[in-house]
Image (cartoon, rainbow, N blue to C red):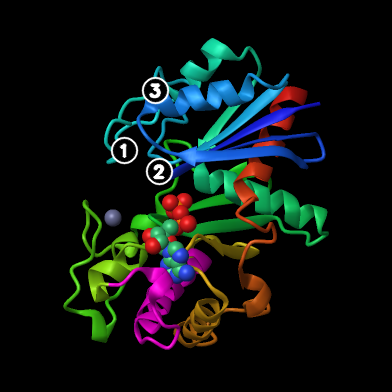
Amino acid sequence: MLIGSIEAGGTKFVCAVGNEDYRVLDKTSFPTTDPESTLNKVIDYFNQFDLEAIGVASFGPIELRKNSEKYGYITNTPKPGWQDVDFVGILRDHFNVPITWTTDVNGSAYGEYVMSTLANEKTKSLVYYTIGTGVGAGAVVNGDFIGSLGHPEMGHVLVKRHPDDLNFEGICPFHHDCLEGLVAGPTFEARIGKKGADVDINDPVWNIMAWYIAQAAMQTTLTLRPDKIVFGGGVINDTLMDKVRSQFSDMMNGYIDIPNLEQYLTRPLIKDNGSANLGNFALAYQELKA
Ligand code: ADP
Ligand code: ZN
């Protein structure tokens, strides 16, 4: 059985073909350009296979209420050209198979949830954050996503400012200094004029990043009490995660019982950014079986 997966990112699309064991059999990626050429590439790629279902995890905001006439659309995204695009409708015109539709971070959250179960972790609830070009999070509780009016937008929560960061305006076009405005990848250029990948790991900016990410972890812990919080995205590295755990522990100040921090605040179980793909395979396979 062949299942297709699309991880639609604002920067690039990753398409993969997998099987019912969620194993990747083939994979390709290409830059996200205009909707027509990008989706045509997806269609050409998938036309090579005899797919039985397709899972899509997309950048957003997206419409995921099944009773909306805009179900399957990317809605009011700031990404030029991509407002009001009928993503699922275009796929349906070419592929007569079940198609699942969720956000990129929901897809990743689901992949990590499935993998945790396969790894016998007994994870019942999980939140997945991406700290990349943007910031967002998805939450899975007992196999279901949280969010019925729309998907969560945890990337845009407000955080307390770091005392050494008061002069930085933040880069979120909507809120300036929300979480995304303070820790998304492009904040490195905005704060210190260097790309994230070129910033020395001893640079104090990492303490500022950790302070905000730890607050996100604290709010999420206090609000949802998930079994674990997974951090993915290009900005995350092991040293940053150690700083986040330590700041989190200081902020929480022993208020509630937290599992072992290495396991509680963690990087993805699925390597090579494969979480969303695996989540898509699992969601599409379940839709097919339903
Ligand atoms: P996307 O969010 O577009 O799917 P990524 O998760 O790879 O992609 O995140 C890309 C962002 O991460 C960019 O803003 C990039 O500058 C930043 N980034 C990439 N590598 C690093 C690194 N080693 N350290 C910090 N930031 C990085
Ligand atoms: Zn914002």
Residue nearest the observer in this picture, 275 or 244: 275
Mark 2 in CB contact with mark 1 (< 8 angstroms): yes
Give the answer, above or below, for where 123 lies relative to 278. below
Dot placed on the residue nearer the N-terminal end, 1 or 3? 3
Query: Would residue 221 be counted in the magenta stretch?
Result: yes
Residue nearest the observer in this picture, 133 or 57: 133
Residue range (magenta): 194-222
The overriding secondary structure of the stretch rendered in magenta is helix
Q: Is mark 2 within 8 Å of ligand 1?
A: yes
Ligand 2's quadrant is bottom left
Look at the numbered disc 3 and give the secondary structure of its residue.
helix
The residue pinned by badge 2 equals 10
Give me the C-alpha separation between circle 3 and circle 2: 14 Å
Look at the numbered disc 2 and give the secondary structure of its residue.
loop
The residue pinned by badge 3 equals 36
Dot placed on the residue nearer the N-terminal end, 3 or 2? 2
Q: Residue at x 55, y 21 (%)?
A: 43
